[in-house]
Structures are given as structure tokens and as C-alpha cells.
Amino acid sequence: MAAPVDTTTVFLPDTLKGKVAFVTGGGSGICKGIAEALLKHGAKVVIASRSLDRVTKAAEEMAKSTGGECFAVSADVRKPEDVEKAVAQAVEKFGGIDILVNGAAGNFLVPAENMSYNAFRTVIEIDLIGTFNVSKACFPHLKKSKGTILNISATLHYNGTPLQSHASSAKAGVDTLTKVFALEWGPYGIRVNSIAPGPISETAGIERLLPKEYAKGYIRAVPLQRLGSIRDIEHMAVFLASPSGNWISGSNFVVDGGSWLTGNSFQYPDSIERMRKMAKL
């Protein structure tokens, strides 16, 4: 069962008026949805990705659909020099940064024994080190604006997920960074939280990690009996970025229909074999 189509919003359209957001991974999927939601609620948005063509096209689409200002920059979050340059471009364009969304990520299914050293390192570098790099580069500007950071995490590491040792490790680190940054940067007025989405329909990630023939079985293990929608994540992001979240920091918000409570939906001991088949390994 796919997520229901939802075109509504529960927030006033000027909720984020005057704010500037910097969103990594904003050219597609969940983070594109978050970027568009921030635009719809009055923020100016900078989206960053390694592919300038992708984010330029996405920025043009979102500016047209929302009437907002969206600016594209190229950055490989693994490279501090790229990140520093992109942040400088954002500040030059819009004058500062109030909201940072760390959403750049990499993932694929692979058993640990078959994973190359480079594959494991690459996912750690994108998800975890990238989150640190971008947060550090944006810190002076967030300190000035008393801004907020939203880290996009996952629930993979709560119970352990087969074929996901790389992404699970990276997201566990992201959750820890969220807490440490909240403690260290709270005195500067910076709020830091994370959002852990469950499987979200109509995204590249769900197509790669949960083929259609297995989706029905997975949904049976979700208490709300459906996959999530990008809109579900957008609402949480706008809430945390808005004044509604002014007393919230250091927290991780799970948005997955309650599925983390059920553990791995492909119940062990056959879960690993079923996931191997999913990945055609």
C-alpha cells in the first residue's frame, strides 16, 4: 500500500519567512521534498550536491513551483574544501544561514563479508563525515543567526539490519553527532536534532532497497500499515525548523509509522536470505 497523496500543509505559509536554509542532498528524494517545503513556507533555500546539473535543474523546478528563491551549488560533502566553498557561495547569495539540513547519503545492499573496504569507507565518509564537515563549515553562520541543524538519520541501527553494516554504522554516528553538537553548540543558541525516516514510497532509496515484490510483506509489519510519504518527513522538518521547535534540541524524531518497534520486518532467521534475494546477491 503506497502512502496516501497529501497536498496539505498544517503550517502558515510565512512560517519560515526571512530564513535561509542550506540543504545537502537537496536535488532528489526526501531532501528535495524538505527543500521544497522550506521554500513553500517562506525560506530562501540553497541545495547542494556533487552533481551541479542535478541541483540546478531541481532548483529551477522548485523555484517555479513555489515562487521562492532556490540557489544551487556543487559540493562533495566528503571534501572540506568543496563544502567551505559552497557555504561561502550560499552566504554571498543570501547573506547568512539559519537552517542546515544534512541529508547527503549513500546506501546499497551488501553482506559485510562481500563489502569492499572502499565501499564501507565511502558510505561513512558521505553520511557521517559529510555531516560533520557541513555542520562545521556552517557553524559560524548558525552561531550568528542562532540557527538550527536537522540531520537526516535512519532506524537501521536500532535493531541491526542485515546487509546494511555501512549505512547503519554511519547513521549511528550521525545520531551521536546530533547529541554532541546539541550539547556543545546549545550555549550559542543553535538547536540540533535528527529525523529518522522509515521507508518512504516513490524514492530511489525504496526502489533499490525494497523491491515491489517484498513491499507487501514489509507493510504488514508497519503498525500504520503503509509506507511513508515524503510529505510525512517534510512536516517534521518544517516543525523543527520553525519557532514551534524552539525548546527542542538533542532529540531524534522517528517518522516511520511505528515500524521500528517491530524490529526487522523480514523476521530472523530467514531475513538475511530474503534480503540477499532482494539484492540479487
Image (cartoon, rainbow, N blue to C red):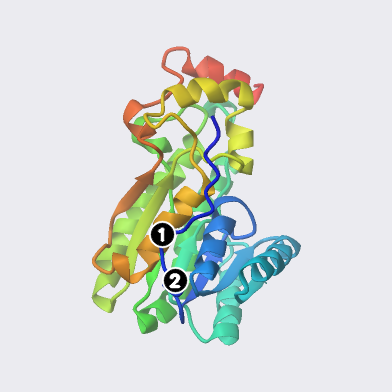
What percent of the width, then of the height, locates residue 281? 65, 21
Q: Amino acid at mark 1?
A: Val
Front residue of this view, candidates 236 and 101: 236
Q: Is residue 66 above or below residue 140?
A: above
Residue found 28% across the figure and 78% down from its top: 188
Q: Quadrant for residue 116, please give it.
A: top right
What percent of the width, then of the height, locates residue 43? 50, 74
The local secondary structure at tag 2 comes to strand
What percent of the width, then of the height, locates residue 85? 60, 77
Q: Is residue 206 above or below residue 104?
A: above
**Residue 116 visible in the displayed image:** no
**Residue 203 visible in the displayed image:** yes
Side (left or right) of 253 relative to 5: left
Crowding near the residue tagged with mark 1, few <14, some 14–19, many ≥20 C-alpha atoms within 10 Å: few
Q: Quadrant for residue 45, please give it.
A: bottom right
Front residue of this view, candidates 109 and 9: 9
Which residue is the site of mark 2? 99
Q: Which of the two marks, 2 or 1, is nearer to us in this view?
A: 1
Among the two numbered marks 2 and 1 on one chain, the one whose residue lies closer to the N terminus: 1
Residue found 41% across the figure and 29% down from its top: 222
Side (left or right) of 188 relative to 165: left
Which residue is the site of mark 1? 10
